[in-house]
Image (cartoon, rainbow, N blue to C red):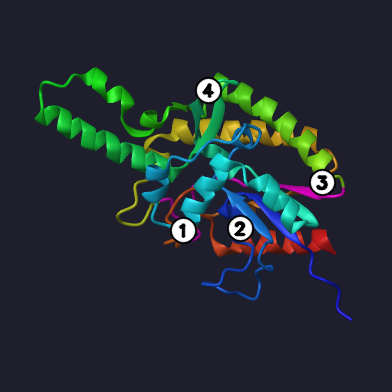
């Protein structure tokens, strides 16, 4: 009789998700699909009371996965879905903590959401449209731009690399560890501390045609993001001292050339995901 497959849930990003099977890209080396995958969120969101998702914004997100992830972030569906799927192991990675936050005022205090790429793009489109309209109709003033984009929903952006967000995250991490232990006392937790490399699998650092290499144009932004994620990782290791740490050897810290989701420091070559999958297998034996 074969033993049951371990039930694994993921809280984090595609850096961990790509070690698991996809319907579109099956591969023998990938692990079985996770029982739950929550992406595009922050611990600050998960520890904040729910927010009503702005429906015009949600409707403008074309990709079903991105739309669902954004709605889940606002509604804090992670907790109910984690309870429903009852996993054996929760793997946490921090790469989606790269996003800025959104703050909304409520009668019981501020509430927060994650300003993922889809929201950023929608906000920029709205602001460009408003700016063009402002130039076309000179009677409008620049101050009228205050209620354009996400601000029309009472949401104010907070920069990830800021003392305010750092304080919010530190408090949320404490609350997250306490709630997770209270609601899932037998759940095993593992931490995946993923790198943000800049060298491609072919040894080059040159991006493909049509790709904007923001990490080369603004290296200080990448350095700041690495520092923030490293700080978060140290905090989680203190909060979950019993959790094994998944760290893929440096020889696999390479970007995927022509990656299916674009060339970015968090889109690795398949060798990284293969090595990660093997580490997870060893962990579950």
Mark 2, other Cα within 10 Å: few <14 / some 14–19 / many ≥20: many
Check disc 4 and report its element: helix, strand or loop. Answer: loop
Mark 4, other Cα within 10 Å: few <14 / some 14–19 / many ≥20: few
Of badges 4 and 3, nearer the viewer stands 3
Of badges 2 and 3, nearer the viewer stands 3
Q: Residue furthest right?
A: 1
Q: Which residues are magenta?
A: 186-205
Check disc 3 and report its element: helix, strand or loop. Answer: loop
Marks 2 and 3, the one that precedes in the sequence: 2
Of badges 4 and 1, nearer the viewer stands 1
Position of 125 compared to 62: left or right?
left
Q: Is residue 108 magenta?
A: no
Per the rendering, the mark at residue 230 is none
Q: Main secondary structure of the magenta part?
A: loop
Q: CA distance from mark 4 to mark 1?
A: 31 Å
Check disc 2 and report its element: helix, strand or loop. Answer: helix
Marks 2 and 4, the one that precedes in the sequence: 2
- Residue 217 seen: yes
Marks 2 and 1, the one that precedes in the sequence: 2
- Residue under the point 48% across and 41% down: 53
Residue nearer the viewer, 237 or 41: 41
Q: What is the quadrant of residue 262 in the picture?
A: bottom left
Per the rendering, the mark at residue 17 is 2
Q: Which residue is mark 3?
A: 184
Mark 3, other Cα within 10 Å: few <14 / some 14–19 / many ≥20: some
Tell me the quadrant of the picture where the C terminus can be found.
bottom right
Q: Which residue is mark 1?
A: 64
Marks 3 and 1, the one that precedes in the sequence: 1
- Residue under the point 45% across and 61% down: 259
Q: CA distance from mark 2 to mark 3?
A: 22 Å
Q: Residue furthest front?
A: 107
- Residue under the point 43% across and 44% down: 117
């Amino acid at each position: 009789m074969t033993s049951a497959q371990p039930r694994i849930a993921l809280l984090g990003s595609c850096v961990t998700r790509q070690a698991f099977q996809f319907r579109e890209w099956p591969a023998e080396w990938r692990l079985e699909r996770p029982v739950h995958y929550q992406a595009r969120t922050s611990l600050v969101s998960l520890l904040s009371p729910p927010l009503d998702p702005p429906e015009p914004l949600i409707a403008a997100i074309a990709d079903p996965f991105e739309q669902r992830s954004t709605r889940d972030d606002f509604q804090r569906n992670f907790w109910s879905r984690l309870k429903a799927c009852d996993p054996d192991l929760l793997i946490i990675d921090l790469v989606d903590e790269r996003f800025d936050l959104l703050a909304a005022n409520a009668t019981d205090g501020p509430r927060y959401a994650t300003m993922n790429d889809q929201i950023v793009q929608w906000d920029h489109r709205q602001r460009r449209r408003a700016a063009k309209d402002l130039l076309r109709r000179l009677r409008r003033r620049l101050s009228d731009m205050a209620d354009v984009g996400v601000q029309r929903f009472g949401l104010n952006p907070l920069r990830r690399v800021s003392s305010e967000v750092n304080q919010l995250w530190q408090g949320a991490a404490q609350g997250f560890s306490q709630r997770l232990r209270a609601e899932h006392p037998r759940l095993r937790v593992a931490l995946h501390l993923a790198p943000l490399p800049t060298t491609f699998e072919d040894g080059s650092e040159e991006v493909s045609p049509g790709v904007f290499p923001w990490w080369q144009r603004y290296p200080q932004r990448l350095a700041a993001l690495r520092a923030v994620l490293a700080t978060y990782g140290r905090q989680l290791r203190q909060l979950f001292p019993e959790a094994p740490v998944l760290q893929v050897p440096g020889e696999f810290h390479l970007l995927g050339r022509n990656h299916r989701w674009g060339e970015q420091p968090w889109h690795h070559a398949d060798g990284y995901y293969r090595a990660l999958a093997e580490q997870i297998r060893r962990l579950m034996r």
